[in-house]
Amino acid sequence: MKKIITILLTVPTLLSFSQVKFTEPKLKINHGDLTLYLDSDTNSFVSKHELKYSDFKKLDSDRDNRWFQDVYKGIYNKEHYVRTGYDLGHLTPSHITSYNDTLNHESFSLFNQAPQLASFNRGKWVQLEKSVEDSIAKYKSDVTIITGVIYDNKNKVYLNKSKIKIPEVYYKILVIKTKKKSLTYVWIGSNSNGQVLISNIKELNGVLIINGTDLKFN
């Protein structure tokens, strides 16, 4: 974890101009605008949300709030989270899917969450999620939002004697598709101290490499 924190503290503030692509994991669950990717251990990995501005304007305060076991069954059980200090932390947040009741329900797939330190989930991370919505409102454009977690695959840590891995890091990528260009924002957050910093694709790939993660963004 010390190496990750070192990277986070040296990341410059950067806004890059590019499209973002990544090597898609083989385990994939499609839910329309929402695509969930699992790692080789069948744990939550990446959530990609394709959001049109016309749908963004329909957001409301309704939440389905019923977590469910998705297509790949087996490891997830909400009882493992009890009295651990970890929340079921959404990757794609429920509010930004509230333009469609079916999609909002699917945002409560247990594969759209990972153990997230409660103070982190309810603090700086939710503030980041609100900032993302503010950016969409500002640019009035379609967006792609990629949210993922990074596990230390060299020293895996599990939740309550389960097979549910605890992430070291959460990250979020926002690609705003304006008429003239694409704007890309990247944030990385520590799941141990709750710190969230602006980053870039190069630094994110560096954190992935350090943790032995077979995923690369470009």
Image (tube, rainbow, N blue to C red):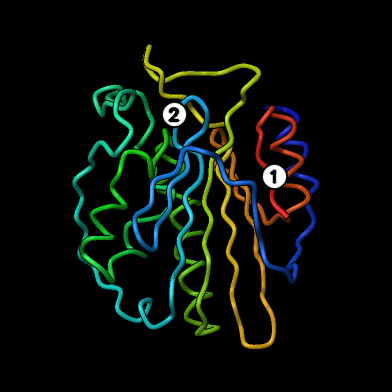
Residue beneath disc 2: 42
The one of 152 and 106 positioned closer to us in this rendering: 106
Q: Quadrant of residue 126?
A: bottom left
Residue 63 relative to residue 92: left or right: left
Residue 168 relative to residue 28: left or right: right
> Furthest-bottom residue in view?
179
> Gap between marks 1 and 2, in whole Å?
18 Å
Residue 2 relative to residue 147: left or right: right
Q: What residue appears at the point 32 percent right and 38 percent down from the top-left corner? A: 110
Residue 216 badge:
1
The one of 187 and 213 positioned closer to us in this rendering: 213
> Furthest-top residue in view?
161
Q: What residue appears at the point 69 percent right and 27 percent down from the top-left corner? A: 212
Give the percent coordinates (x, y) of residue 57. Answer: 35, 81
Q: Earlier in the sequence, mark 1 or mark 2?
A: 2
Residues packed near mark 2 inside 10 Å, few (<14), some (14 to 19) or many (20 plus)? some
Q: Secondary structure at mark 1?
A: loop
Q: Amino acid at mark 2?
A: Thr
Give the percent coordinates (x, y) of residue 207. Answer: 71, 38
